[in-house]
Image (cartoon, helix red, strand yellow):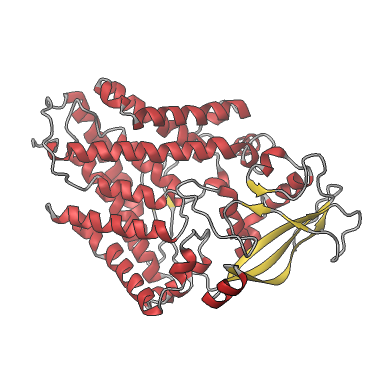
Amino acid sequence: MDWFTASGYWLSRLVFQRALAGVYLVAFLTAALQFRALLGSRGLLPIPRYVERMPFKAAPSLFHLHYSDRFFAACAWTGCAVSAALLAGLDSRLPLWAGMLLWLLPWLLYLSIVNVGQTWYAFGWESLLLEVGFLAVFLGNDDVAPPIVVLFLLRWILFRVEFGAGLIKMRGDACWRKLTCLDHHHETQPMPGPLSWFFHHLPRPLHRVEVAANHFTQLVVPVLLFTPQPLATAAAALMIVTQLWLVLSGNFSWLNWITIVLALSAVEFPYDAPSTPDAPLWYEIVVLAVAALLGCLSYHPVTNMVSRRQVMNRSFDPLHLVNTYGAFGSVSRIRYEVVVEGTADDVPREDSDWREYEFKGKPGDPRRWPRQFAPYHLRLDWLMWFAALSPGYAGSWFGTFVERLLENDRATLKLLRRSPFPPDAPPRYVRARLFRYRYTSWRELRETGACWERTYVREYLPPTRLAGVAQRS
């Protein structure tokens, strides 16, 4: 190992790059399959309308230069193709400079999508993918051993992800300090998974152990990333185990998976690395310059992290180069869900034939068991969880969503699991009602077969027709 590279991490880099390419592939596939209904020309929050009022400098994107649904689709599917090529190792078969450009392409494409994605892309893992993806450009390929400074910066991201999440919990909801948050979290999390019901019904003392272990992993273990081996590898391995536990307990898009990818870069695998020539001078200069830039940009995330008014998941630059992270600074005690229904009756009455729309991931029918979707991201389902917390979260798009249901819009219906109306017979009215959901007990599950029990709370949207979509209450 010379002063610039660490040959012992040759296999670590390979595993990291292939895993990151897999996350990129999922992210672009999510964009390609969902954009038309969410962001397209007739989407719930159209990109053309957004770029008209948002200057390029504030949100750099290819779609400031040109937008059409066909062009967006081309960008998303190109991202899929490049990600698949990187997953197959094409970058290792190219010269160093060409491999770097190949890694730069998905970053540029995904940055263009995130910067016009509005609320549909306002999740911490979007910025995390961009920050990690930018560093991957400078990690090199088989022509050079991994640069030490880039490996350090990857650990610096992992430290901020975990330590920032730990701090926001300790400063936020008191239940984290009392070790009681998991009495509620598995039931009230945005999108439960197939095992979440069982996690919720674990003994309460075990929930206390889970929370305490989480605090240890997020507030103590990250410091060990910067210690010598094998301690750093042990710290990364512990983080991976914790993230896999979270994968089993819920659907958090690719947040857990990209955290695992980051942790893999800190693992020193027992492997005899092939000999590589010294890094070219131009490469050393570029890497060190980028490292200096990222070091300067780290000022704001560090300031935020030590502040008592710490905020979660914020980018401090339009390129998302260095960001701040955190999750679940507060935990809901009660789960609310918005249930959307339609009727073909000419006059909407309480006893009309109201039929429920079924979403793919979010709870609906109490007898329908949650499915595993992560790392795939069901964006509408996630925003419906926020909409249930407060109508303000849905003020910009929910009315248009109802209009699209009244039109039987094909792109919108593809976001759902099932529409209760045939394609040629849209509903005459659509309404939304707010329900409280809770997990059933073991006895209730055996007797009814239902994993949820729901109770009507109030009207969320009165019966609405195309002649004039009413505002929500």
**What's the residue at 51%, 47% (across, down)?**
377
Please name the residue shown 37% across and 70% down the image.
170
Dividing the picture into quadrants, the one containing residue 280 is top left
Which quarter of the rendered picture does the C terminus lie within?
bottom right
Q: Residue furthest front?
A: 447
Relative image position of residue 401 (x, y in whole percent): 70, 48
Q: Residue furthest left?
A: 2
Image point (24%, 65%), residue name: 220
Which quarter of the image is occupied by the N terminus?
top left
Against 313, is 177 above or below? below
142 sits left or right of 218 in the view = left
Residue 13, image x, y percentages: 23, 38
Residue 119 x/y as whole percent? 57, 48
Give the residue at x 40% y 62%. 310
Residue 417 image offset from top left, x and y in percent: 63, 48
Does 298 sit left or right of 364 as displayed? left
Q: Quadrant of residue 389?
A: bottom right
Rendered view: 46 above or below 433: above
* Residue 190 in sight here: yes
- Which image quarter: residue 294? top left
Residue 326 shows in the view: no
